Image (spheres, rainbow, N blue to C red):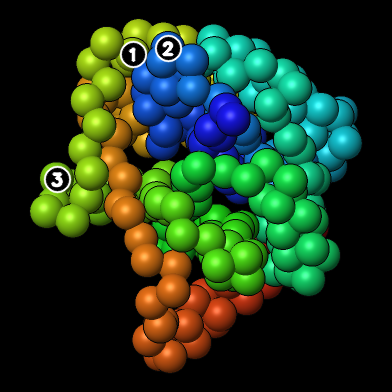
Amino acid sequence: MVETCLIFSPHQDDACLACGGAILKKTKKKENIVIINTCNGRNVFLLFFGVKDNPSPKEIEQIRNEEDIKAMNLLGVPKENIIFLGFEDVLMYKQRKNAEEKILELIKKIKPSEVYIPSDIEIHPDHIITSEVVKKCLRKINFKNPVYEYYVWSRSKIKEKKDLITVDISEELDMKKKAIQEYKSQVEIFLPQQKEPVLEKEFINQFYQNKEFFKKIDIFKNENILYKFYKGIKVRFISLLWTKFKI
Ligand SMILES: [Zn+2]
């Protein structure tokens, strides 16, 4: 049986940014990779620049999905291995139950040999909810294979530490950079209203390094109740802050 590495990406570019080198290393060894994008990423221009139309959120979603397919193709992941669940950007916490059902069903079907998820220390609510929902689903099926966290918005806080796994991606870096450049709507000035790209150069540069960091986590470990409470507040507060004024 072919073993499958399953990577959850809250938005279309997250898996590439944080794991692009590791993905390419695996596909070079003919390992099977499946990417599940949980959110649709369609509200990014509305949230950042107040753009409601032309392109519409639906068009943005389409553009971002296509960018992801092109980028992942460069990293050796075929189109049929990329799944878009399309939960509403920034509001995934409101669809948690639905997300749990869909993700559980997919995990049971894919039967991954290892799983990668975004860290729950991230600031973005969709990253936190994706992390929490996947962990819950994995616990439900008593998943005993390795689970790793990766870092996008918290990347700057991550340095080489004892409990982190460092992957040398120096041979994959050039292709990873090309793959990141495929997310044109995020890394370039895409609309005339923009002065800066959605993802600024300084942010992107964090991922143009020859190392990627992961942490092997124990999904069965009891979580500190205060930390859980803090995360819940963070998700609601940031989602509300964005959506109240923008969406
Ligand atoms: Zn994201």
**Closer mark to the observer between disc 2 and disc 1:** 2
Provide the residue designation for mark 3: 160
Q: CA distance from mark 2 to mark 1?
A: 10 Å
Going 77% across and 55% down the picture, which residue do you hit? 105
Three-letter code for the amino acid on which mark 1 is drawn: Glu
Q: SS for tag 2?
A: helix
Q: CA distance from mark 1 to mark 3?
A: 19 Å
Categorize mark 3 by other alpha carbons within 10 Å: few (<14), some (14-19), many (20+).
Answer: few
Earlier residue among tags 3 and 2? 2
Q: CA distance from mark 3 to mark 2?
A: 25 Å
Numbered label attached to residue 172: 1
Instruction: Give the tally of numbered discs.
Output: 3
- In this rendering, would 113 be left or right of 176? right
Earlier residue among tags 2 and 1? 2
Q: SS for tag 1?
A: loop
In front here: 111 or 122? Answer: 111
In this view, the residue farthest toward the bottom is: 225
Q: Look at the numbered discs 2 and 1 and tell me whether their residues touch, using CB distance below 8 Å.
A: yes
Is label 1's Cβ within 8 Å of ligand 1?
Answer: no
Numbered label attached to residue 189: none
> Where does the C terminus fall, quadrant-wise?
bottom right
Categorize mark 1 by other alpha carbons within 10 Å: few (<14), some (14-19), many (20+).
Answer: some
Going 79% across and 63% down the picture, which residue do you hit? 101
Numbered label attached to residue 28: 2
> Where does the N terminus fall, quadrant-wise?
top right
Where's residue 55, x and y in %? 84, 29
In this view, the residue farthest toward the front is: 1
**Closer mark to the observer between disc 3 and disc 2:** 2
- In this rendering, would 246 be left or right of 233? right
Three-letter code for the amino acid on which mark 3 is drawn: Glu
